[in-house]
Amino acid sequence: MSSFVLQFLNGLTSASTLFMVAAGLSLIFGITRVLNFAHGSMYMLGIYLAYSAIGAFSVGGVLTPVAFWGGILCAAVLVGMVGALVELTVLRRVYRSPELFQLLATFGVVLLTKDLVLWFWGPEDLLGPRAPGLGGAVEILGSPFPEYDLFLIVVGPLILGLLWLLLHSTRWGLLIRAATQDREMAAALGINQKLLFTSTFALGAFLAGLGGALQIPREPAQHFLDFTVIVDAFVVVVVGGMGSIPGAFLAALLIGEVKALCIGIGEIGAFGFGISLPKLTLVVESLVMAAVLIFRPWGLMGRALAVLPDAGEARPLLARNTAATRMAGVAIVAALAITPAFANQYSLVLLVDILIFALFAASLHFLMGPSGMASFGHAAYFGLGAYAAALAFKQAGLPMEISILVGPLVAVLAALSFGWFCVRLSGVYLAMLTLAFAQITWSVIYQWDGFTGGSNGLVGVWPAPWLSGRISYFYLVLLLCGGAVLILRRIIFSPFGYALRACRDSPMRAAAIGINVSRFQWMAFLVAGGFAGLAGALFAFSKGSISPEVLAIGQSVDGLVMVLLGGVQTISGPLVGAAVFTWLQELVARHIDYWRALLGMIIIVIVVAFPHGIVGQLFSRNRAKE
């Protein structure tokens, strides 16, 4: 009994921290409609700054309450200032850009922040001191429980109360609520939106920094905290309802307690996969999010207004290519075909990667462009295609040629089941449900040691003897990826593709003329999943091994970055974006120690210079001239 009580209290402690981070993220989205991917970086900065500030305030190495709590507050304030600086220097320059590209700008900030932290604090984990006066434990039902954790349990409701007072008892809160309800009307009434946006970003970053700083006695400062926390924060915000502070608090309690319950029950087998309930804590928030969104599409306390903005200010045009564009395409394919005559082995490997990721990005673009559905979990199909091909080759003993076909088939089956649920949602809720399914899939593969190899993955996945040479495999990838992209283009300009765009542009009118919107969008999931699975199968045989990272959120984010870098408005956009991103990542990582920072700055510059993506910007200019 005491263990369950202690786990219940642990759940409350985790919920308090989750709420502080999610409340800031919810505030920022409610006002600016920016999905701030850099919010997890603010949390990470908070814990690192708290470590340094507490040390700086300690006189002669003696830790006092003033030094500890002063360091915590100083760290949170500094993070708030960093948030304001990010809004002023980066996001303010791209507010007129399509709002999904603002998400891309915040991803650049993530990369930049990660390497700045690595440069300043080094690669080692940093564990801070215990809080003065709260370093002991109290006995609860005969078991000790940390006093500091009891303090954190109180902090969450206290922050909720203070935020409620701020939003309902001050003029600034009134302006925030007005802008949340109707941003255009608030601007028409003369509200200074620039000041409102900056102050909101500062407050949101302050809350994230405070949540991180308060964790310094409980966990070490680590470099992967930004990705871990941002996923949890997005889940809490979506489950609670985008823009709802009470909803975020309720969702944080729900997720915190469910995770604690999984640990408290103890290890028991589940589903025949050898996955125990404690291990389900890796993905339990995704299971909760999927369940909530399936039965309550706008979260526990959300509204239908929280939709993901379009990828462009106008809908992607996707006009047919001109004769000059077709000639350019033929020239590029011809150049690739003769590349092996003068390229070295390294160049061929890089070109194979570019071709594979170009197909992966094109499949994601098929969802985002003509279908109008953003996906944050597209790596699920890429990874399932890779694992299906590898397992067919290794476990079933099928020839490599047949195994490659198994990959897209399994990916289509996954899209068949996942898409059935996803098309019933829209906007950010649809995108987050795709992320939930991807995380669930990753968890199963990561923990199913006996079948998938678990965290070690699978090795020895090599092409057939006639394709063992780099040149032979390059031509196979060029043929399959090039042919797949042409098929995708043909589908986009087929009656099915035009019907998809009708569902995207005006679902009600499409339904009125007899188009089954959900069915067409579901079919779009199957097409996109199948081609992503083909890319994954080719990737597995190109590397000779496969690991769970191919299904992780980082892979999905990379695909999203590729599409947005090139631009959603044209078919060639994701191809160019994949080539630029893959080449930049490989080039910078090979020659520069802090390559993430440079890559992040390059992404930010590209977003500012090309607010519709590289190809999309050129396409928009040409349309403007016409």
Image (tube, grey):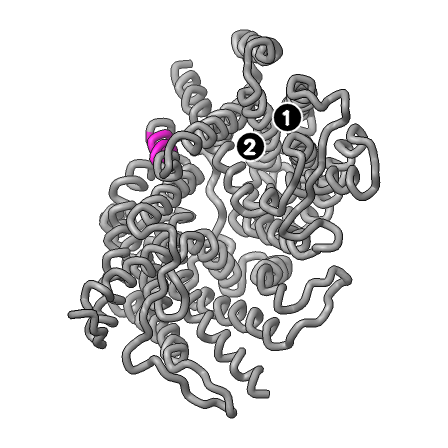
Answer few, some or many: residues within 10 Å of disc 2's Cα (few below 14, many 20 plus, some between 14 and 19): many
Per the image, is 604 magenta? yes
Q: Position of residue 78 (x, y in %)?
A: 24, 57
Q: Amino acid at mark 2?
A: Gly
| Pick the front one: 233 or 466 | 466
| Pick the front one: 538 or 379 | 538
- The residue located at (61%, 71%) in the rendering is 262
Q: Amino acid at mark 1?
A: Ile
What secondary structure is marked by label 2? loop
Residue where numbered disc 2 is placed: 369
Q: Is residue 292 visible?
A: no
- The residue located at (43%, 33%) in the rendering is 589
Q: Position of residue 585 (x, y in %)?
A: 45, 32
Check if mark 2's residue and mark 1's residue have beta carbons within 8 Å.
Answer: yes
Q: Is residue 146 visible?
A: yes
Q: Compared with residue 142, is residue 46 higher up or lower down, i.e. above or below?
A: above
Q: Position of residue 448 (x, y in %)?
A: 70, 55
Q: Earlier in the sequence, mark 2 or mark 1?
A: 2
Residue where numbered disc 1 is placed: 492
First to last magenta residue range:
601-608
Quadrant where the N terminus lies? Answer: bottom right
Give the left or right position of residue 435, taking residue 232 as reference.
Answer: right
Answer few, some or many: residues within 10 Å of disc 1's Cα (few below 14, many 20 plus, some between 14 and 19): many
- The residue located at (49%, 48%) in the rendering is 307
Overall secondary structure of the magenta section:
helix
Snapshot quadrant of residue 342: top right
Snapshot quadrant of residue 607: top left
Give the left or right position of residue 454, taking residue 27 as reference.
Answer: right
